[in-house]
Amino acid sequence: MPAPFDLESFLPYRLNRAAELISLSFSKEYKQRFQMTRPEWRALAALGSVGRMTATDIGVHSNMHKTKVSRAVHALEERRWLKRSENAADRRVEHLELTAQGQKAYREVADLARTYQSTLEKALGSGAIERIEAGLADVEQALLARPRKRA
Amino acid sequence: MPAPFDLESFLPYRLNRAAELISLSFSKEYKQRFQMTRPEWRALAALGSVGRMTATDIGVHSNMHKTKVSRAVHALEERRWLKRSENAADRRVEHLELTAQGQKAYREVADLARTYQSTLEKALGSGAIERIEAGLADVEQALLARPRKRA
DNA sequence: AATCGACGGTTACACTTGCAACCAATTCGA
DNA sequence: TCGAATTGGTTGCAAGTGTAACCGTCGATT
């Protein structure tokens, strides 16, 4: 007899449901205020917190598909929130970094994020978020270390 | 000076990244094997594990938008994996349940899921998944209890 | 019983997304 | 050293998605 299958305790399902919920909840905080899509916010956040990066770097860092990154970067560029600079050594890549306006926007959204998380932390109790994130790190590491379908 | 903002420890970001990663990884297991989309798999899983439900039930259970459910159900129906039955007492609702073929498919995919999760569990150590899921449950509860802007 | 609002479910439309094909620049290999 | 394979990045297209508007049914109020 096969072991019972309980969807409620199937990790991909649970992770997705929680991620969707929290993501939607937080996106409301910036969507109407900055007219920013989720990929845009992610790219902005990556650039703001890491500094100068290439498009590929952003994709790896935030696990976004490269076309998504490409479009988000394009949108941020049109807003004059980031500028590209050529790399003389390898002219395929373009280094990206935030303009002054972009950094200002980043600070504002980062502020929103800090507030959001600290409210959540208050509701969950201290250390709860760290524990979850430690667990997530383990999951990611396991998945990346043992890719089920190479490359 | 504002507190520093570290994207790496921002929960919505981390949750999304992990969810995307695991979801993609698992979907590879069934997508090409069953030509099934994610909403279809979710609806199938809900019906298979809970039993007879209405479309609305499925949406609540798996946190899917009703149009997504509608389309997934339609697709499953065309495959003859589920059948609808009228409710004489209320002709708006339609009870949905899996056909024999649908149950067979469900068993196969559930099997895949079990295997997937047990492999993961082995890599993570016993209890790790339960701990993460307990944390996720807390997060969901906090978000649903204190909706920042939600009907 | 006629009306109004709510509800289950579907659909039209516009927007977003991923895949694959592509371009240009670089590296590899015989 | 020249061509093939690889890489960073963009784009055309088809498929997926959410919003809003809709249809038919139900329940309550009158």
Image (cartoon, coloured by chain):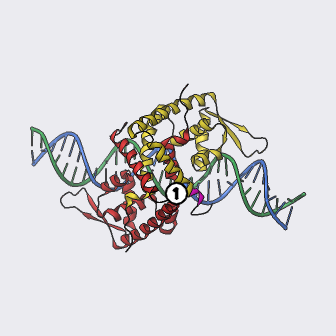
Chain colours: A yellow, B red, C blue, D green
Q: Residue shown at 42%/57% (left/top)? A: B39
Magenta stretch in the rendered image: A143-151
Chain name for mark 1? B
Q: Which amino acid, by three-letter code, is at mark 1?
A: Leu
Q: Residue at x 58, y 40 (%)?
A: A43
Is B75 rendered above or below residue B133? below
Pick the front one: A65 or B5: B5
Q: Which quadrant holds the N terminus of chain B?
A: top right
Where residue C25 sits: x, y (%)? 78, 48
Q: Which residue is mark 1?
A: B24
Specify whether residue B35 is painted magenta. Answer: no
- The vertical placement of B145 against C12, above or below, is above
Residue at 67% across, 37% down: A52
Percent position of residue A111, x then y:
50, 31
Point 47% across, 64% down: residue: B118
Question: Does residue B112 lie above or below B62 as drawn?
Answer: below
